[in-house]
Amino acid sequence: MIKNGIPVEAAFREWHKDPAYRAVYDGLEEEFARAAMLIEARAKAGLTQQQLAERMHTTQAVIARLESGRVKPSTRTLERIAAATGMRLRISFEAI
């Protein structure tokens, strides 16, 4: 079956031409980076979302939401993730 539509890459190129879209997209960079760090920490520990959830005494759905970037984790949650993955949490300020 053939579906009519545009490939995602083509749509993204079109959207990216719009300054308003670009501004919103660029504004999400930190959220994407935070989500990527959480996923990387879990992967380095060799854990599935379910295993991490069990170590943190929470649910896999909570881990999925954190890793999606849709939720901003509290410092306490970041500390729990660090402990569950055998890492140390380090927070710093950087000049812009």
Image: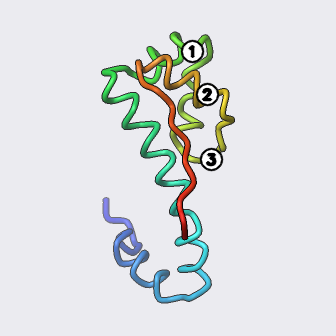
* Residue 79 relative to residue 87: left or right: right
Residue at image point 51% right, 63% down: 29
Mark 2 vs mark 3, CA separation in Å: 11 Å
| Closer to viewer: mark 1 or mark 2 | 1
Q: Earlier in the sequence, mark 2 or mark 3?
A: 2
Look at the numbered disc 3 and give the secondary structure of its residue.
Answer: loop
Residue at image point 48% right, 17% down: 84
Residue at image point 39% right, 21% down: 48
Q: Circle 2 is placed at which residue position?
A: 62
* Number of residues whose C-alpha sits closer than 10 Å to that of mark 1, classed few (under 14), some (14–19) or many (20 or more): some
Relative height, residue 84 to residue 6 (above, below)? above
Q: Report the amino acid beneath label 3.
A: Arg
- Disc number for residue 56: 1
Q: Tell me residue 56's x, y (percent).
A: 57, 15
Q: Report the amino acid beneath label 2.
A: Val
Residue at image point 56% right, 88% down: 19
Q: Circle 3 is placed at which residue position?
A: 70
* Number of residues whose C-alpha sits closer than 10 Å to that of mark 2, classed few (under 14), some (14–19) or many (20 or more): some
* Number of residues whose C-alpha sits closer than 10 Å to that of mark 3, classed few (under 14), some (14–19) or many (20 or more): few
* Residue 13 relative to residue 80: left or right: left
Q: Tell me residue 12's x, y (percent).
A: 42, 75
Look at the numbered disc 2 and give the secondary structure of its residue.
Answer: helix
